[in-house]
Image: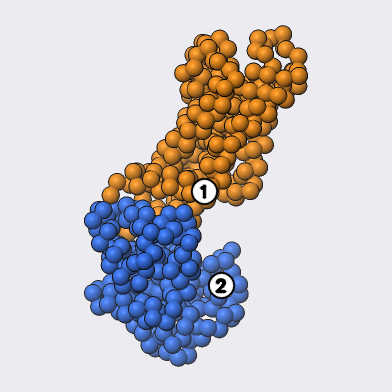
Chain colours: A blue, B orange
């Protein structure tokens, strides 16, 4: 099944870019292609720098503790034990999950699991952040903390790209791309007109 | 941070934190060894087989016990966290290193499971060559561990994959077992995964010797399975391209 028939976009340093669209429009497919976990049928993707990917569902190992999860993914990033430890404590303090470091992933609430999911994407200070609805399950305080963090990272030069469904977030985004009918449109200048919560406008397809 | 050490530690923790694994590994040997032994106790002695049926039954129970646990562990190692594995690979963790940590963990688990089965076996039988008997039991487990991993890589569904491994191991142990109930089996049974390990084990246990050709066959079998698992796992973990600084 073809989900995307044409996608042309660029993500620049220090920007917060939103990808919006109806359910099944191909947002996650687009992000998976940009991250590199899904291969595009045609076209090219140029990637420079390091990437941090926060998938929509927390892709973590249920029976590992939070600390062990950091160690394993940190090893994947090629970080030293000291760097992993520093990142773990910094993010645990920032996102308020210090008390859960010895808990297993399958013992965490959905919101706390999502914090770990996000932290794994952030732990190596990537140049580009790819976030697929990263705040699912967050309480209001954590949601605000998340946005502070995203703005701090962008100010430090990180390119932040996120799939968003909330129309009120559009004021926080530097640029907005809408995925519609298999195409990607830059709708930055149409703020307020983009129906990001429309839900069923597009045909249901596998994302 | 050392990726291999960290990966193996994570795999072992995951294994030990799955209670069913531990219960199966410890209890199944007693059930299958004695169960298989008693099931064959009433059968007549085969003219071509010197072993007493009950002892042969216990040996088959041991080989089946090791194979089934190792096979299911191999399957679970490949299936249980495939999506998380893809994310881990995306971070830069090489697929082959990940697979190596999985297979190393499987090897360790197989040795422990074989030791438990061997311990239960020793309660009723005194092997002529104890070390060889244990080594060949480990080899039988490794064959099924790799086979389970291959099934898991090809058929990433726990229920369906478990059925394949369980039925294959049962049929394999039964047909390979020189049982009077499975007389006149076709020649291709010799290529079944447990046939040659069973031959090695039987010879070591009852005669204290082994045939080099049989050992070479099992080594070749393991090598082929390893190549297949590596290839299939590599395909399932393939990403479209890396990020470069």
Residue B233 drawn above or below residue B39: below
Q: Chain of mark 2?
A: A
Q: Quadrant of residue B125?
A: top right
Residue B105 lies left or right of residue B58; in this view the side is left
Q: Are marks 1 and 2 on the same chain?
A: no
Mark 2 and mark 1 in contact (Cβ < 8 Å)? no
Residue B220 lies left or right of residue B245; in this view the side is right
Q: Secondary structure at mark 1?
A: loop
Residue A160 in percent (x, y) is at 34, 73
Q: Residue at x 48, y 61 (%)?
A: A107
Q: Quadrant of residue A163?
A: bottom left
Q: Nearer the viewer, residue B238 or B150?
A: B150
Instruction: Look at mark 2 in the image and give the residue it sits on.
Output: A24
Q: Chain of mark 1?
A: B
Q: Considering the image in quadrants, where does the N terminus of chain A appear?
A: bottom right
Q: Nearer the viewer, residue A36 or B90?
A: B90
Q: Residue at x 61, y 75 (%)?
A: A203
Q: CA distance from mark 1 to mark 2?
A: 36 Å
| Residue B93 visible (yes or no) | yes
Residue B114 in percent (x, y) is at 51, 29
In the image, farthest residue toward the bottom = A192
């Amino acid at each position: 099944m073809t989900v995307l028939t044409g996608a042309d976009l660029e993500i620049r340093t220090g920007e917060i870019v939103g990808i919006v669209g109806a359910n099944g429009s191909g947002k996650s497919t687009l992000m998976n292609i940009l991250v590199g976990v899904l291969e595009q049928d045609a076209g090219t993707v140029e990637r420079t720098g390091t990437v941090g990917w926060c998938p929509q569902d927390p892709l973590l190992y249920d029976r590992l503790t939070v600390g062990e999860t950091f160690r394993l993914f940190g090893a994947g990033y090629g970080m030293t034990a000291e760097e992993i430890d520093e990142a773990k404590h910094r993010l645990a303090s920032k996102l308020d999950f210090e008390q859960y470091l010895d808990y297993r992933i399958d013992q965490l609430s959905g919101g706390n699991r999502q914090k770990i999911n996000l932290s794994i994407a952030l732990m190596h200070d990537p140049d580009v952040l790819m976030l697929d609805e990263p705040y699912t399950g967050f309480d209001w305080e954590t949601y605000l903390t998340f946005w502070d963090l995203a703005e701090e990272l962008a100010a430090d030069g990180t390119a932040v790209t996120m799939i968003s469904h909330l129309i009120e977030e559009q004021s926080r985004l530097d640029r907005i791309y809408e995925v519609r009918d298999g195409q990607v449109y830059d709708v930055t200048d149409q703020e307020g007109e983009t129906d990001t919560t429309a839900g069923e406008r597009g045909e249901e397809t596998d994302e | 941070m050392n990726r291999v050490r960290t990966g193996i530690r994570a795999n072992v923790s995951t294994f030990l934190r799955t209670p069913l694994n531990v219960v199966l590994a410890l209890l199944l040997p007693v059930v299958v060894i004695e169960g298989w032994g008693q099931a064959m106790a009433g059968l007549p002695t085969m003219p071509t087989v010197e072993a007493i049926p009950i002892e042969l039954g216990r040996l088959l129970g041991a080989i089946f016990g090791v194979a089934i646990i190792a096979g299911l562990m191999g399957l679970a190692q490949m299936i249980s966290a495939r999506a998380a594995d893809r994310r881990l690979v995306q971070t830069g963790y090489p697929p082959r290193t990940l697979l190596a940590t999985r297979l190393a963990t499987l090897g360790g688990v197989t040795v422990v499971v074989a030791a438990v089965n061997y311990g239960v076996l020793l309660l009723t039988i005194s092997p002529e060559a104890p070390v060889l008997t244990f080594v060949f039991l480990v080899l039988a487990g490794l064959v099924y561990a790799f086979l389970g991993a291959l099934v898991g890589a090809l058929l990433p569904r726990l229920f369906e994959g478990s059925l394949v491994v369980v039925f294959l191991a049962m049929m394999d142990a039964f047909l390979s077992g020189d049982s009077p109930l499975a007389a006149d089996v076709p020649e291709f049974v010799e290529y079944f995964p447990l046939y040659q390990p069973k031959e090695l084990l039987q010879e070591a246990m009852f005669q204290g010797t082994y045939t080099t050709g049989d050992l070479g066959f099992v080594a070749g079998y393991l090598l082929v399975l390893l190549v297949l698992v590596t290839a299939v796992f590599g395909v399932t973990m393939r990403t479209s391209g890396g990020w470069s600084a």
